[in-house]
Amino acid sequence: MFLPVTGHGASEEEDGHMGRRSTVLRTAGLTLAALLVLAAAAAGWAYWHLNSNITSVDIDNALGDNRPPKPVATPSVPAPALPGGALNILVLGSDSRGGAENQRLGGGDSSGARSDTAMVVHLDAGRTSATVVSIPRDTLVTRPSCPRRSGGSTAVSYNSMFNSAYAVGGPVCAVKTVESITDVRMDHYIEIDFSGFAKLVDAVGGVTVTTDEDIADDDSHLRLKAGTHHLDGTQALALARTRHGIGDGSDLGRIGLQQKLVKALLDQIAAQRLLTDPAKLYRVADAVTAGLTTDTGLDSLGELTRLGQSLQGLSASEVRTVTMPVVRAPSDPNRVVAEEPEARELWESLR
């Protein structure tokens, strides 16, 4: 005769609890797996999206070897985990007419674009200090022969405005012209248009600048009283474009405002603590890459990230802003030419 065994097996009620618990665990596991897949897909999409924002130009291939030499690296020094050598980057702000957003912000409705702002950014070895040299767009230069995208080359042009190089031959001609007048090799090229600059300023929460005089410029539509102001992206862009409402109305006055903006933007980015806020980091990265054109050496998110990481020790207080020394052009009081030997000595200090 067999007797029922008690106290060793699970009851029907316990079996039910275990079944429900197993179902919950399986559901939680599937949900977590799905979330991980979605997160990975979102991260992949974000990386692809930021990469696809960037437009690139193969400047090295277009210009070949007829350029100022690259600085010679110091031998016997182990290669650092991040790049740390001296670097020269041509940074242009273009008044691109492409797209409704650029037109709304003042790019106009005609085709083409000009280099509205030109700065040579020199990073010292170690990347803890930098010099930003502004080149007035009204500077008369000898524009060298530049390769055309459609084939052939442009003719050499004498006593041409500096910003005509971009209008005639795009980034390649802009780089070649800068190298021609400075005898300094540009290691990289970065261009940002109106829309990209405004989005970047908005993404970091605006910038705070102090103006020394009232500004009233009908062209940039900016009205500011002298004093300290916190500007959004549209206002900051208008300040960068202002020239007729300050000083003598020349490009030199505008350059002073642009240099204030550079310092203010560096301070604001440093205050963001982006590495602790992934959502804000993405918004800033999206803004930085929107409207961005680079040389092929900086045309991926990974390359831009490495450049940014190499600048972690650079503070706004260690960034010196200067303007290429110029004097009024004898042939045209509305234009300037490089003042020598001061301009040559400045460029020599950046080689």
Image: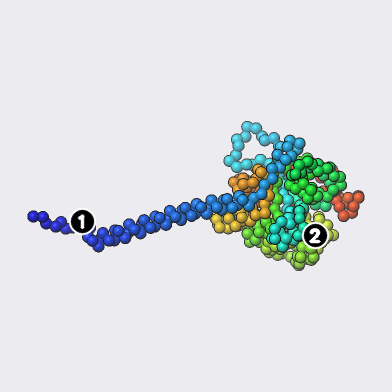
Closer to us: 220 or 75: 220
Quadrant where the N terminus sits is bottom left
Q: Residues within 10 Å of mark 1 (few under 14, many from 20)?
A: few
Q: Is residue 221 above or below residue 259?
A: below
Neighbours of disc 2 within 10 Å: few (<14), some (14-19), many (20+): many
Q: Position of residue 12 (x, y in %)?
A: 23, 61
Does residue 167 appear to the left or right of 284 in the view shown?
right
Residue 192, how many percent across, how many down?
70, 53
Q: Report which residue position mark 2 lands on.
A: 243
Q: Quadrant of residue 195?
A: bottom right
The residue type indicated by label 2 comes to Arg
The CA distance from mark 2 to mark 1 is 88 Å
What's the residue at 77%, 49% (across, down)? 166
Q: Tell me which numbered mark, 2 or 1, is placed earlier along the sequence.
A: 1
Q: Find residue 56 and name its label.
A: none
Residue at 63% x, 59% y is 203
**Does dot 1 land on a helix, a strand or a loop?**
loop
Q: Residue 23: percent from the left, percent from the top?
A: 34, 58
Residue 10 visible? The answer is: yes
Extreme residue in the left direction: 1
Question: In the rendering, which numbered label is found on residue 9?
Answer: 1
Residue 346 visible to an observer of this rendering: no
| Amino acid type of the residue that numbered disc 1 sits on in the rendered structure | Gly
Disc number lying in front (2 or 1): 1
Q: Secondary structure at mark 2?
A: loop
Q: Nearer the viewer, residue 64 or 212?
A: 64
